[in-house]
Image (spheres, rainbow, N blue to C red):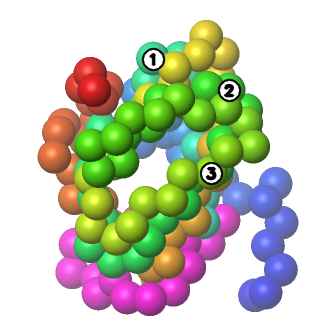
Amino acid sequence: MPFIRHTDQPWTEIRPGVKWQFITGHFAAPDERVGPGLTMFYQVVQPGFGVPRHRHECGDESMTVLEGRVQALVDGEVEVLEPGTTVLVPEGKVHSFRNAGDSELRVMFVIAASALRPEFLEDPKGVPAAY
């Protein structure tokens, strides 16, 4: 269906302090082939929480800050981002982020892949290690 009402899409919490809402795409099944496509999702992240270091072998990714402050790591470079900022993550580059503020962080992700399959370099359920 070409029209997707965001308010109709469910939210899930897959790690402490982080809720996800997929608009397009999904988490890839273990035997699923991930190829070109479009995966879009939102995350709401509580202060101090985030997503540990990982990479995607298929698809460039963008992360846009909608509300809050985020400390982002991309390929060894660290930057603090505020609303209205987008970070671009090339396919295969290690990246991570954490909520660097004292209120909820809201971010939007778009990945040029048919599904999301992160390869984690840290505990996927943990809080990101210090940068």
Q: Quadrant of residue 30?
A: bottom left
Q: Is residue 25 left or right of residue 89?
A: right
Quick one: quadrant of the N terminus?
bottom right
- Tell me: 99 left or right of 73: right
**Above or below 97: residue 63:** below
Sequence-wise, the earlier of marks 3 and 1 is 1
Ranked by sequence position, the earlier of labels 2 and 3 is 2
Magenta residues span: 22-39
Residue 68 badge: 2
Neighbour tally class for label 1: few under 14, some 14-19, many 20 plus, Cα within 10 Å: some
Mark 1 → mark 2, Cα distance in angstroms: 12 Å
Q: Are marks 3 and 1 in contact (CB under 8 Å)?
A: no
Observer-side mark, 3 or 1, equals 3
SS under mark 1: loop
Circle 3: element type = strand
User: Where residue 39 sits: x, y (%)?
Assistant: 54, 72
Question: Which of the 4 quarters of the picture holds residue 89?
Answer: bottom left
- Residue 48 marker: 1
Q: What is the distance, in whole Å, between disc 2 and disc 3 at their CAs?
A: 13 Å
In this rendering, the count of numbered labels is 3
Q: Is 126 placed left or right of 51 in the picture?
A: left
Residue drawn at (27%, 43%) of the image? 76
Q: What residue type is disc 1 on?
A: Gly
Residue where numbered disc 3 is placed: 86
